Image (tube, helix red, strand yellow):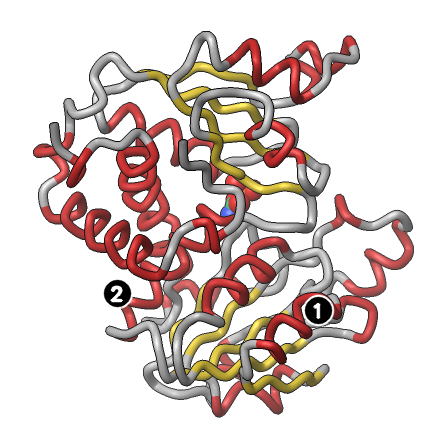
């Protein structure tokens, strides 16, 4: 039984295999349109989502399977006090695989320990978001042609940003990657992530200035300051517009910079940047569906994605 709770649950070879399969699916999606006939995916979302939930559902439907689930805690028996462990035990009687998003760190692990179907962590609080990481790796590979030897800047909410924590963990296994951590003091990357970078011998620097970091970056990973993670509205309002990427700032950036964002975006990337050829965040969204198709096939043990 394999789950995806943390990007490190997949070996580097398995990630290459999965990314290869996602690219095969992109080339010929019809070939895979029936491989999951009779299989069901449950999407258990205790927190809002547009991309992750809908791309998982689209992925399973595109593989010929079907989907069931709930899109908020309010529409599930969590409101009556049911535990995650009990809910997943029940759902595992209805579905072959489940993707779960929850506001609490470790919720997906609790689910995985309580059932006999593969569990995908679709985001657990400010901790990890491994299927987004796979999407991000595919996007970097398709745009840079490699998963090594580049300088990546992470900008915005590095404290609560689960997509950031996940991608950094995954990238530490590839050689020659330098990390530039761009955030205000209050939203710096947690020390456990920095310790992981030190243990891996990675080069990293911290700065509060996007303008300072931008000219030397190969990849820029922008993030939203997440209102839902703040205890205090005042702090959120003070920090939310710290970084706004616009065309003027991008004048100093490399011509082959890859601009990524897990989305949703609020103000941190001006809409004018959407037309810049370096903006890849909507391609990143498209990659998410294909990578999740490959992930479902891998976790269901459908050899080579075909049966
Ligand atoms: N990137 C991402 O997790 O988006 P959603 O919150 O819309 O799923």
Of helix, strand and loop, which one carries label 2? helix
- Corner quadrant of residue 105: top right
Q: Residue at x 27, y 19 (%)?
A: 65
Left of 137 or right of it: where is 89?
A: right
Q: Residue at x 29, y 38 (%)?
A: 298
Crowd class of label 1 (few under 14; some 14 to 19; many from 20; radius 10 Å) = many
Q: Nearer the viewer, residue 202 or 260?
A: 202
Count of numbered tags? 2
Q: Position of residue 219 (x, y in %)?
A: 44, 76
Q: Position of residue 167 (x, y in %)?
A: 50, 62
Q: CA distance from mark 1 to mark 2?
A: 27 Å
* For residue 282, above or below residue 42: below
Q: Nearer the viewer, residue 252 or 102?
A: 102
**Among the two numbered marks 1 and 2 on one chain, the one whose residue lies closer to the N terminus:** 2
Tell me whether circle 1 and circle 2 mark residues in contact (CB < 8 Å): no
* For residue 21, above or below residue 236: above
Q: Which mark is residue 142?
A: 2
Q: Nearer the viewer, residue 142 or 10?
A: 10
Q: Position of residue 183 (x, y in %)?
A: 71, 74
Q: Which mark is residue 189?
A: 1
Q: Residue at x 14, y 38 (%)?
A: 29
């Amino acid at each position: 039984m394999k789950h995806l709770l943390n990007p490190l649950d997949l070996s580097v070879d398995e990630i290459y295999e999965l990314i290869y399969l996602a690219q095969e699916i992109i080339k010929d999606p019809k070939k895979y349109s029936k491989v999951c006939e009779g299989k069901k995916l449950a999407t258990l979302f205790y927190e809002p989502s547009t991309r992750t939930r809908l791309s998982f559902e689209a992925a399973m439907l595109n593989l010929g399977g079907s989907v069931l689930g709930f899109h908020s805690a309010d529409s599930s028996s969590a409101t009556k006090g049911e535990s995650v462990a009990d809910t997943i035990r029940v759902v595992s009687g209805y579905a072959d695989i489940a993707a779960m998003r929850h506001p609490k760190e470790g919720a997906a692990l609790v689910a995985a320990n309580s059932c006999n179907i593969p569990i995908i962590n679709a985001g657990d609080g400010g901790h990890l978001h491994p299927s987004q990481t796979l999407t991000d790796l595919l996007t970097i590979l398709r745009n840079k042609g490699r998963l090594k030897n580049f300088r990546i800047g992470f900008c915005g909410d590095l404290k609560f940003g689960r997509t950031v924590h996940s991608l950094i963990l995954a990238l530490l296994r590839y050689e020659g990657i330098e990390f530039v951590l761009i955030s205000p003091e209050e939203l710096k990357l947690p020390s456990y992530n920095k310790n992981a970078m030190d243990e891996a011998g990675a080069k990293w620097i911290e700065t509060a200035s996007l303008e300072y970091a931008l000219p030397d970056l190969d990849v820029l990973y922008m993030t939203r300051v997440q209102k839902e993670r703040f205890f205090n509205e005042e702090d959120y309002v003070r920090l939310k517009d710290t970084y706004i990427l616009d065309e003027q700032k991008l004048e100093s950036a490399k011509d082959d910079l890859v601009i990524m964002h897990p989305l949703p975006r609020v103000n941190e990337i001006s809409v004018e940047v959407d037309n810049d050829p370096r903006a890849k965040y909507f391609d990143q969204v498209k990659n998410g569906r294909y990578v999740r198709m490959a992930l479902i096939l891998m976790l269901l043990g459908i050899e080579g994605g075909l049966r």
